[in-house]
Every structure is written in C-alpha cells, then in structure tokens.
C-alpha cells in the first residue's frame, strides 16, 4: 500500500507541475503589440532578444525591411528559410508603416527582397499568422507570397497594389473575406485556390483579368 500511495502521489505531483509550467509559459507570452522602428534595413534581428523571439505574438514594424528582416519575421511566424517549422508564434503583423527594400539575406531558399514588392514565397508556410497589414507602398504581391498561411484570417491589401500573383493566397484555409482594392487590375491563376473558409470577396471593376482557377474550392456568399 505504501508503494502504491507514493506512486500515485508522484503522478499527481507530476501533473500539477505540468499545469503550473504551462501556466507560467503562457504568462511570459508577449501578447501586447510591440512596435519597433528600424532606422536601417536588416537590423530587426538586433532589436529582439533571442530569448523573446519565439514569445512575441503581436508586432508592428516601422521603417525599411530587407531580406534579413523578412527571414527573421518568418522565423517568428513559424517557418524558416528552408520551409521548416519553427517555435515562433507571431500572430498579428502590422507593416502599415514599413517598406520592403532590396538587399540583405535570402529569406526563403534563393528568394531576395525587391523594392515595394511582397516577393514570391515571402510568408509561405507562416502558419502562425492570423492577421497581416500590408505596407501602403507595396505595388505587387508575387506568386506564393502567402501560400499555406493556414491560420490567416485577415489580410489588409493596400490601395497601391496593382497585381496579385498566382497562388498568392492558396491554401489560406482560415481566410473568410477579402477586399480587393480598386488599384488591382490583375489576379493570377489559383490566387485564392483552396481558401476553403472564404465566403465573401469584393472584386472592383478595375480588375480586367482573372486567371483560371483563381477561386477554385471556395464557397461564397457574396461574389
């Protein structure tokens, strides 16, 4: 009986410690918005301590962003330069006062940033992202830019964007609605394919070209 009691007691203590550990971990999550101003592109990795990198859930960046910064953001949002899962949990990303510029490291395999463009595979596989505000300076969202962002619910496409590339938002299965600004003239092939939660899309009259398969496997209430 003594052995059984001790064993049960140890199991109980183990469960309690796990509960406390989980609570403590959640207590340390940085859920309030963190705003960082970059005076020079490529310096984001110097602004966030390695011990906090995977605890940030809400981030706003002001200033210029290059490939080095985007690689770091990707890691914070759950996907590294080779597409492998990371421990990052960045959920809300506000880039309304940021600007993409050329330079820095590759952010995904052989992909590098360009001026005022959300490049191909920019946020591909960043499954932690739920909300993204695109910089007001962006003119193009290239192919596969948000491919597989399965938790993405809201994306604010700026009024300067003229083209949404092929497969740009494919497999964004949590995306429920999209407001395409009147600046957009072209939507690429399979751009919103497999967005299985997408029920509402606003397409302005400025759009003169919608490629095949753009909305395959989507269900709409208003289109």
Image (tube, rainbow, N blue to C red):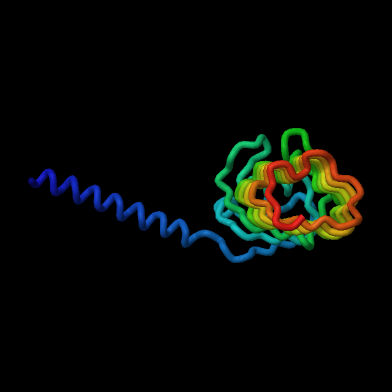
Residue under the image location 65 percent in, 42 percent down: 125
- Of residues 152 and 117, the one nearer the viewer is 152
Q: Quadrant of residue 191?
A: top right
Q: Report the quarter where the C terminus lies.
A: bottom right
- Of residues 14 and 121, the one nearer the viewer is 121
> Residue 186 at x, y = what percent?
88, 47
Q: Is residue 1 left or right of residue 46?
A: left
Vertical placement of residue 210 versus 20, above or below: above
Is residue 3 at all visible to an observer of this figure? yes
Q: Is residue 175 left or right of residue 98?
A: left
Q: Is residue 30 left or right of residue 168?
A: left
> Residue 19 at x, y = what percent?
36, 55
> Residue 26 at x, y = what percent?
47, 59
Count of numbered circles in the view? 0
- Of residues 205 and 87, the one nearer the viewer is 205
Vertical placement of residue 32 versus 135, above or below: below
Q: Residue furthest bottom?
A: 32
> Residue 129 at x, y = what percent?
64, 52
Q: Residue furthest left?
A: 1
Vertical placement of residue 24 versus 1, above or below: below
Residue under the image location 65 percent in, 58 percent down: 92
Residue under the image location 67 percent in, 55 percent down: 176
Residue under the image location 71 percent in, 60 percent down: 94
Q: Quadrant of residue 95?
A: bottom right
Is residue 122 at all visible to an observer of this figure? no
């Amino acid at each position: 009986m003594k052995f059984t009691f001790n064993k049960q007691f140890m199991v109980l203590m183990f469960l309690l410690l796990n509960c406390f550990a989980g609570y403590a971990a959640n207590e340390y999550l940085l859920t309030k918005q963190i705003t960082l101003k970059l005076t020079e592109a490529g310096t984001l990795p110097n602004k966030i301590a390695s011990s906090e990198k995977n605890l940030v859930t809400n981030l706003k960046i002001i200033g210029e962003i290059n490939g080095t910064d985007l690689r770091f953001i990707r890691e914070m949002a759950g996907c590294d330069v080779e597409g492998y899962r990371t421990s990052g949990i960045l959920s809300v990303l506000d880039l309304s006062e940021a600007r993409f510029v050329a330079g820095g490291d590759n952010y995904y395999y052989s992909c590098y940033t360009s001026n005022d463009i959300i490049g191909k595979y920019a946020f591909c596989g960043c499954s932690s992202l739920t909300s993204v505000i695109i910089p007001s300076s962006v003119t193009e969202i290239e192919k596969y830019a948000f491919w597989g962002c399965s938790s993405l619910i809201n994306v604010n496409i700026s009024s300067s964007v003229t083209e949404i590339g092929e497969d740009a938002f494919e497999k964004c299965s949590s995306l429920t609605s999209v407001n395409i600004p009147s600046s957009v003239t072209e939507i690429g092939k399979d751009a919103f394919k497999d967005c299985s939660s997408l029920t509402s899309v606003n397409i302005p009259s400025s759009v003169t070209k919608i490629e095949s398969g753009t909305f395959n496997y989507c269900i709409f209430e208003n289109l």
